[in-house]
Amino acid sequence: MNILTVVGARPNFMKAAPLVHRLRERGHEAPLIHTGQHYDANMSKVFFDDLRMPEPDEYLGVGSGSHAAQTARVMVEIERVLLERKPDMVVVLGDVNSTVACSLTATKLWIPVAHVEAGLRSRDRRMPEEINRLVTDAISDLLFTPSRDGDANLLAEGVDADKIHFVGNIMIDSLVTHLERAGESDACSRVGVEPGGFGVMTLHRPSNVDDPKTLAGILGAVAEVSQTLPIVFPCHPRTVARLESDATISKILEASSILRVEPLGYLDFLRLVSQCALVITDSGGLQEETTFLKIPCVTARENTERPVTTEVGTNTIVGTDPDKILAASRAGIERGVGHGDVPELWDGNTAARIVDVFERIS
Ligand code: UD1
């Protein structure tokens, strides 16, 4: 088969890598197209290197912009690619703007769409990703779910059961494949922390970082946590801009043991997360990675589209209330690492299961 995979933003890369490898290994034509939604070297190229991903066959260079502008640019560019390449199937991953743009475009060209990481729902329509998930799932032909709640959500929305395939979490394929290599990373010593003696924080959701009061509240709580546990803070470009434009926030950071660093590559970041005592985040993927690694995770969001990470995993959803962030962080440090269970089929073999489905239906 000719199965074309589209990636655009950082969380796509670790999901696409195992699938593209597996497709090519099994003799399929598997072109890889990069929309260019993320373009900085440390948001994109480093992941291709770390994950040993093949170079993209085409780079569309759409870049940043408003949601409408970015989505529209991806649609125009990918339409040309799809008309030229005429794939049998298009694979889209996750919930970023590139995902919804490509699924919309492909489906109108009558090219079947497979959505990897289907069925997740936060039920918060103010989140752009929730809109991307709803639209993509509504028009995709194959829906690959990472957890059973995904199947239940899709069935409740009236999706035909034949389209839904519970295959597990493909991001864990990358984690399992690269965890040992990540052990060779010197990220801990470069940042100046001892394995086991630090926490990691990431923040990039517009709802958390765009309002200075909300951001200052979160950082104030984390600054307090950092008095007992230094917190490494790899900073997304969106967040950097916000930190630097607010004097109160600069002061909080200066007086804390929050160690701000550039966005990190896949191996360096995996090394840090696998060696840390606590994660504070608003990322979706990190809720899953910490669950697999059994590291306590405090999620600074009001909801999660990944409930399995709170049911069997290590994740606590606390919103942005500073007192709750502080209390949950202290509880996580107290509880320690190694608790919780790994969800069903988060075993490193999800890409193979997806290719099995493609081969069965071809
Ligand atoms: C996007 C995804 C989000 C995902 C996140 C991971 C959507 C709607 N959002 O959010 O789901 O969790 O990626 O990072 O698709 N920028 C750079 N360099 C880059 C990329 C971005 O400087 O390489 C800056 C630009 O100022 C840009 C801003 O970051 O405007 C936001 O980038 P964008 O891709 O629009 O959304 P993210 O916040 O990264």
Image (cartoon, rainbow, N blue to C red):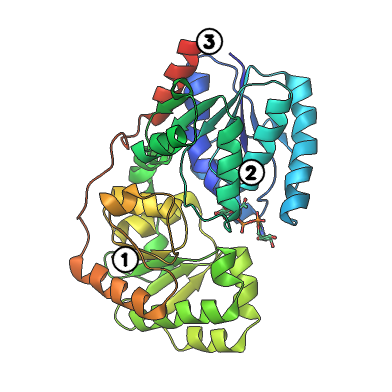
Q: Which of these two is toward me, 188 or 94?
A: 94
Quarter of image, res 323 = bottom left
Q: Which of these two is toward me, 139 or 355?
A: 139
The numbered disc on residue 322 is none
In the rendered structure, which disc, 1 or 3, sits on the residue that comes first in sequence?
Answer: 1
The numbered disc on residue 362 is 3
In the rendered structure, which disc, 1 or 2, sits on the residue that comes first in sequence?
Answer: 2
Residue that badge 2 annotates? 8
Q: Position of residue 27 (x, y in %)?
A: 52, 14
**At numbered mark 1, what does the secondary structure look like: helix, strand or loop?**
strand
Q: Amino acid at mark 3?
A: Ser
- The reply to whether the residue tagged 2 has its Cβ within 8 angstroms of ligand 1 is yes
Residue at (22, 60) in percent of width and height: 337
- Circle 1 packing at 10 Å, graded few (<14), some (14-19), many (20+), is many
Can residue 54 be seen by looking at this rendering? no
Q: Are marks 1 and 2 in contact (CB under 8 Å)?
A: no
Nearer to us of marks 1 and 3 is 3
**At numbered mark 2, what does the secondary structure look like: helix, strand or loop?**
loop
Quarter of image, res 230 = bottom left
Residue that badge 1 annotates? 278
Whole-Å distance between the Cαs marked 3 and 2? 27 Å
Q: Position of residue 110 (x, y in %)?
A: 70, 20
Whole-Å distance between the Cαs marked 1 and 2? 29 Å
Residue at (22, 47) in percent of width and height: 341
